[in-house]
Image (tube, helix red, strand yellow):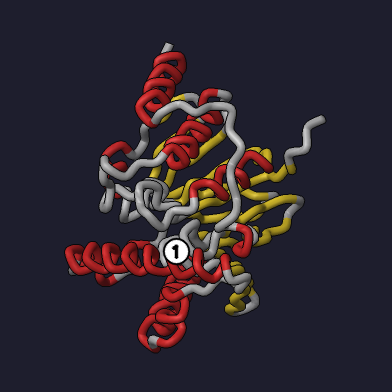
Amino acid sequence: MDTTRKIDLLVLSDVHLGTYGCQAKPLLKYLKSIDPKKIILNGDIIDIWQFNKRYWPKSHMRVVKYILTQIQQGKEIYYLTGNHDEMFRKFAGFQINNFKILNKKVLDLDGKKAWFFHGDVFDVTMQYSKWLARLGAIGYDALILINSALNFILSKLGRPRYSLSKKVKNNVKGAVKFINKFEEIAVEIARERNYNYVVCGHIHQPAIKKYAHKNKNILYLNSGDWIENLTALEYHNKEWKIYQHDLNQVEEELVQDNTDLSPKELFQQMMNEFKIMEN
């Protein structure tokens, strides 16, 4: 019996495959538990900035392989580029089966216009000091590593998880101000373009917020991330909701898989599937 949960649309962002903080195992478990009609990968799925060929575990490869299997099966999937995978922007417009690489996407959802894009275009550090943004990403990854070690110890002691990065964000007024400004700019542009929904990623802050302006409601949505929040956006039966994985189970979870293939063997399988799709 098929036990997968049916949804109309799945939105994922900021998975950061290829980094130590990426929670690939719980992500794969989640992906296997649902059956979306459409998928939007809203940026920073693979972290090209911090890609290190010495660190590409099986769990990360399995996520990529699972997505490729969905492409092969004809699932409608849009890969919207972000700043950590900006290299893919040169391939905008590429399409194979129902998979397409784009920088932004507008969808009609039950008669309402939804505007999807990653959101880094609003980030001043991205526009003017990319080296500073990259340095910050490295520091963030180091913080996540420290946090992982801390949470491992806490789990052994039977204590709940703790997020150092969230603590830093919540206590830095500039960070809170930036997040608020990010949302306001996205909503204002959506209002000008007559969109009903504006859906972003980038800032790792899952949210569903209603903004009212001159008798028009704009819904701002953010899919969060799969490093600390482990969240996604789901749209079904004309309603949006934030899915959040059980953070207290992360340290103990093991993804059941039928294969013990090495990363090299998994990569070869992926290439073989691409050849099939091209024929």
Q: Residue furthest top?
A: 279
Q: Position of residue 257 (x, y in %)?
A: 58, 33
Q: In which quadrant will I find the N terminus?
A: top right
Q: Residue at x 49, y 47 (%)?
A: 24
Q: Amino acid at mark 1?
A: Ser
| Res 133 → quadrant | bottom left
Q: Position of residue 264 (x, y in %)?
A: 35, 27
Q: Position of residue 175 (x, y in %)?
A: 38, 81
Q: Residue at x 40, y 43 (%)?
A: 102
Q: Tag 1's secondary structure?
A: helix
Q: Residue at x 63, y 70 (%)?
A: 158
Q: Position of residue 38 (x, y in %)?
A: 60, 40
Residue that mark 1 sits on: 148
Q: Nearer the viewer, residue 46 or 268?
A: 268
User: How many residues crowd around disc 1 within 10 Å: few (fewer than 14), some, or many (20 or more)?
Assistant: many
Query: In the rendered view, does 239 fall on the left or right side of 182?
Result: right
The answer, for residue 117, to whether it is visible in the render is: no
The answer, for residue 96, to whether it is visible in the render is: yes
| Res 275 → quadrant | top left
Query: In the rendered view, does 247 fall on the left or right side of 110?
Result: left
Name above or below for residue 180 compared with residue 1: below
Q: Nearer the viewer, residue 158 or 120?
A: 158
Q: Residue at x 20, y 63 (%)?
A: 130
Q: Nearer the viewer, residue 56 or 4?
A: 56
Q: Residue furthest front?
A: 157
